[in-house]
Image (cartoon, rainbow, N blue to C red):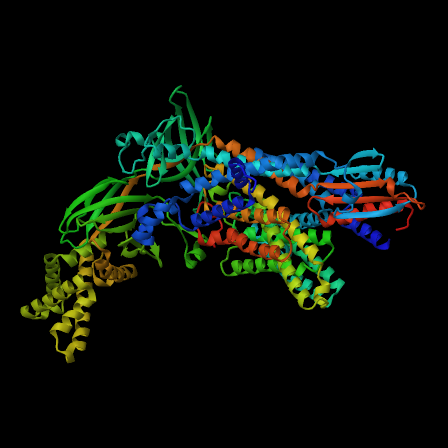
Amino acid sequence: MAKPVSRARAVYDFFSSMSLAVTLLVMLAIASVIGTVVKQGEPYQNYVVKFGPFWAELFEKIGIFHIYSTWWFVLVILFLIVSTTTCVIRHVPVFLRDMNSHAENLSRTALLHQPNHAEVACTQSDVALQTMEAALKQEGFKLKRKESERGVMIAGMKGRWNRLGYFLTHIGIVVILLGAVVDSNLMLKYKVMTGQAVPETRDVPISQINPKAVLPQDNISFRGSVTIPEGQKADFIFLPYDRGYFLQQLPFEMIVKKFHINYYDTGMPKDFITDLVVRDKATGKTVEHTLRVNHPLILGDIAIYQSSFEDGGTQLQLKLYPLTGAETQPMEMTSRIGQKEILETTQGKLRFEFDDFKLHNVVPTTPEEEKQTGRKMHNNGPKLVYKIRNEQGTAKEYETYMLPLKQQGREFFVAGVRDSVAEPYRYLFIPADEKRSLKRFMAFIELLNNDQKRLAIFAQYIKSDPQFSKLSVREQALQIQLWQNLIRLFRDAGFKGIEHFIKTNVPEDKQKSIKDFYLAQLTDGLQVLYVEMLKQQGRIKSRDELTDFDKTWFEDAINAVLALPKFGYPIFVKLESFKLLMATGLQVTKSPGKDIVYFGSLMLTLGVFLLFYVRQRRVWVYFDKSTTSDNGHTVVIAAKDNKNTPEMEKEFKRLLARLQQTCGGTP
Amino acid sequence: MNTVNDTYAEHMQTNPTLKERFSLFGIVWSLLVIVTGVAVWLDLHTYMDVYEKAILIGAVPGLIALGAFWPSIRLYLLGVAALTLLGVWQYSSHGNDVKVQEQLFLLKYLLSSQSAFMWMSALYVLATAGYFFALFIRSEFAGKVATGLTWAGATFGLTGMMMRWYESYLINPDYGHIPISSLYEVFILFSVITALVYLYFEQKYRTRALGGFVMLVVSAAVAFLLWYTFDREAYHIQPLVPALKSYWMKLHVPANFLGYGAFALAAMVGAAYLITDTLARKKPDSTFVKAMPSLEMMDELMYKSIAFGFAFFTIATILGAVWAAEAWGGYWSWDPKETWALIVWLNYAAWLHLRMTKGWRGRPMAWWALVGLLVTTFAFLGVNMFLSGLHSYGKL
C-alpha cells in the first residue's frame, strides 16, 4: 500500500510546484497580450460596433474589455502570491544551510565527485595546505579547517550572498504583488458582489446619484478623476467601474482658479498648468498650488495630478446666416460650449449642439508659406465644433473657423461638414471680401435667392445699358426672363441643373449649341448681378473699375455657391466673439500600496544583482592520511560553483597550478 | 603544465587586475572626471533642479567606477569628450548660431550631430562587413580593423548625441533636452549601446568571430535610421511634450536601452550558435566552425548578456513605474507599453529560470534568445506602431 500523503502536504506541493508557477505566468502573459490588443475600458457601444453584438456580449461576460480587473485575473495574481511564497518557504531551510555551511565534512570520494577535482602528489602536504590556505584567503574565501584522525580538510566558501539573491528576488515579487493588491479595488469588488455598493450607470447630476454609488472618504485606495471648469470646485472624483462609475468623496475641496496652456513657438503645448486651491474640509485650511504635468501635489496620503483639459463652457456670440432664404439678415444667438439650442426652421425643429471650442489650431505650413515666413507651423485661430440634429435624431457635425484662412494668397471663411465621426470633413470655402467679412458673399447669395430683387436689378440694368436699351420691350423682357430662369436653375442644382433642363427640353441635335449659349448667358447674368451689386454698394462706379481682387472673388464665390448643396443644412454659423472658459482634468489617487511596491522593487533589484553577479563558490583542499605512501602524500583539491560557470574551471585550473607548484612540480 | 600556465595567463588578461584598473592613466582619468563634474556644476548648477544635481553628482563616481570596471571605456569617453568640445567650440566661436553647421567645414562634414550620425552609420556598416570578412578569410588584422571601426562608429554616435543635445539648446533654449526622447534619438542610443556592450564582451572573451553577427543587428538599426532620416525627415529636433519634461527620462531611457542592447546581442549570439551548431553537425571540421568560438562559450555569453540585460531592464521598468506614478498618477496602469515591458521581463525571467534551475543549455536556449528579440522588438517598436496608449512618444 502506498504511503498516504496528507492533504495539507498535497496542497503545499501543488502550490510550490514550478509547473503551477509557469502556468500562472503564462496565463498572466496571455491575458496581458489580449489586454493590449483589445483597447480596454471603452464605451460598450464601441465594442458592439467593432465585434458585433454576439461577440461583444460574450467578451464582456469573460471580461475581455476590463481584463486587468476581472475576478479571474485577480485570482491569477493571488495564486502567484501564494505560489511564490510557498516556493520561498520550501527553499528557506535548504538555502540557509547552504549559506552557512562550509561542507567541511565531505569525504574524499565526495570530493572526487565534484565538477572540478584533481589529485596531486605532494612531498610536503602541510606546507602545501598552508600555502593554499593563504592563497584562498587572499582570494577572499572564508575558510574552515578541520583536522581529524583521517586527515586535514580546508573548506573554503565565497559569495554566500548569492543565495540571499534568491530570497530577495522572490520575496520582492511577492511584496510588489501585495502592494498592488492593497491599491487594487478588491474591497470595492467585494462590496459590489455583496450588494453594499452599486455603480451608477446613468448620466445624472451629482445630487441624483444613487447613494450606493457614493463612496466615503475613508476608502483605503482609489484612483479616479474629475473635470472642473475654471472658477468652480469639486470635492469628489469619479471612479470608472465596468459600464458605470462610483463617486468617491474626498476629504478636501479642489477649487480651480485658472487653467493655462503654455506653448512653444511651434504651437506645440509646452505645459499644462492649473492654479489650484485645496481646502481641507475638516480643518478649513487652504493650500494654493500651481499644478503641472510631472509635478503632482501630495497632500498626506492623497496625490493630485494634472491629467487632462477640455473646454469648460466657453461663451459664444454667434450669427446664423440662412444660405437659401430670400433674406440673409443673420440671426444672433448667445450660447456656450456644452449647451444645446433649439431653432424652428422651414426644415423643422433643429437642435444645435455646441460641442467644443479650440482657441489654437496649429497646422503645418505649406511649403510656399514656409519659404515666405520661415515658419513650419501656422495657427488657424479659434475653431468651433457643433452638431445640427433634426427631429429624427440624425446629426451632421460641423467645424467652423472664426477668422478667414489664407489659401493660395486669398482669404476664405472655412467650414467643414460630415455625416459621421468616421468621415473626413468636406469643406466650404466662402471668399472673404475686402474688409475680411462675409458681407459681400451674403449680399450676393441674397440676390441669387431673391427673385424680386434680382428682377429689379436686371430691369434697371437693361434700361441703362446702351446695347440692351435699344431692344424692343418684348426682347428686353425675354432677356430678363432667360437670365432669371438660368440663375434659378443654377442656384438650385448648379451647372447640372442647366444640363438637366437642356436634356429634358431640347432636341438632341441642338443640345450642344444651346448649352454653350445658355452657359454664356448664365455667366453674363451672374456678372451683371455682381457688378450692379457692387455699384449699389458704392464700391465701384463702372465695370472697368473691377480690380483683380474683385474678379477672383467672383470666381471663388461661384465655386462656393456650387458647393452649397453639399453643406447639409443651409445655415452658416459664424462665431463673432467668445469668452474662453477652460476646464481642467484632475486625477486624484490614494495609493498606500505604492511604498510597499517600491520597497519590493528595491528588494527585487538588489536580489537580481546578487543572483547574477555574486557567484557562490566552494573550494576544498583535503589531505587524506590514508593516502600516505613512500613517495609522499596525495592532496585532493575540488571546487564547485552553484552555477557551474566556465570561470570556475579557469579559477580551478589556476588553484590547481598553485598547488602543483608548491607540491613539487610533478604533475 | 604548459597548458595550465597558458590558461592562467589568459585569465589574467581577460580580467583587468587592480593595478590596471587604477593605473596612472586611471588616476588621471578619475581626476578628469571629477574636474569636469565640478566645472559643469559651477557653470550650470543654477539651471538644474535638485534631481538633476543628484544625477550629476552620481555620474562622477559612476563614471570612475565604469572606468575601473572596463578600462577601455576611458579612452573612448575621452575621445567623445574631445570631439564634442571641438564641435561646441566651433559653434560658440561663431556666435552659437545653429546655422553655421551649414558653413563650417568641421561641423558640416564631421561634428554636427547629423554628420556625426552619418559617420556612425557608415562606420558601423563597414565594421559589420569587416568582421565577416575577417571571419571568412581568417585574418587577425581585418578583425582588428573591424574592431577599430566599431569603436570609431560608437565614438561618432555618442559625439553626435552630445552635439544634438547642445544643438537643441541653440535652436531654442526652450527646446533643449537630452536627445533620448524620440524614436529617432533612441535608435541612435540603441546602436551606440549595443556596439559598446558587444565591444566589452569581445574584449572579455577575446574573440572577434561574433562581431559580424552582432553588428548585423546594429546595421539593421542603422538602416532603419537612414530610412527614418531621409524618408520621414525624423531628424528635426522637436521640443518635448509636457509629459516627457522630467529628469526621470535621463535614468529610465538609458537603463532600458542597456537592456534592449544586451537582449539584441544575446539574440545574435544565439543565431551564431545555431549556425555553428548546425554546420558542426554536418561538417565538423569546416573552416567556419573552426573559426567560431566554442559552443559552450557562446552559450555562456548568451547567459551573461541576458543576465546583464535583465538586470538593467528590471531597473528600467521599476524606474518607469516610479516615473509613471509621477506623470500619469499611478505606478502601473496596464498601459500597452508597460504591459509589454512585463511580457519581455517574464520572457527573460523564464529563460533565466530554466537555465539556472533546470540546467537547460544549447540549441533550445539559443532559439529562445533569438525569438526573445522578436518579443523585445515588438515591445520597443511594435507597441508604438500598432497600439496606442499613454506611452505613445515615438510614433512612426
* Quarter occupied by the N terminus of chain A: top right
In the image as oriented, which residue stretches furthest toward the top? Answer: A283
User: Residue B233: x percent and y percent?
Assistant: 50, 57
Question: Is residue B386 depicted above or below A591 in this figure?
Answer: below
Residue B290 visible in the snapshot = yes
Q: Is residue A579 left or right of residue A158?
A: left
User: Residue A124: x percent and y percent?
Assistant: 92, 41
Count of marks, rendered view: 0
Residue A253 visible in the snapshot = no
The residue shown at (56%, 33%) is A599
User: Residue A421: x percent and y percent?
Assistant: 30, 52
Q: Is residue B253 left or right of residue A658?
A: left
**For this rendering, which residue is in front, A46 or A197?**
A197
**For this rendering, which residue is in front, B218 or B374?**
B374
**For this rendering, which residue is in front, B392 or A595?**
A595
User: Residue B106: x percent and y percent?
Assistant: 65, 56
In the image as oriented, which residue stretches furthest toward the front? Answer: A1
Question: Is residue B169 depicted above or below A283 in this figure?
Answer: below
Question: Is residue B157 depicted above or below B329 in this figure?
Answer: below
Q: Is residue A119 left or right of residue B40?
A: right
**For this rendering, which residue is in front, A255 or B103?**
A255
In the image as oriented, which residue stretches furthest toward the right? Answer: A630
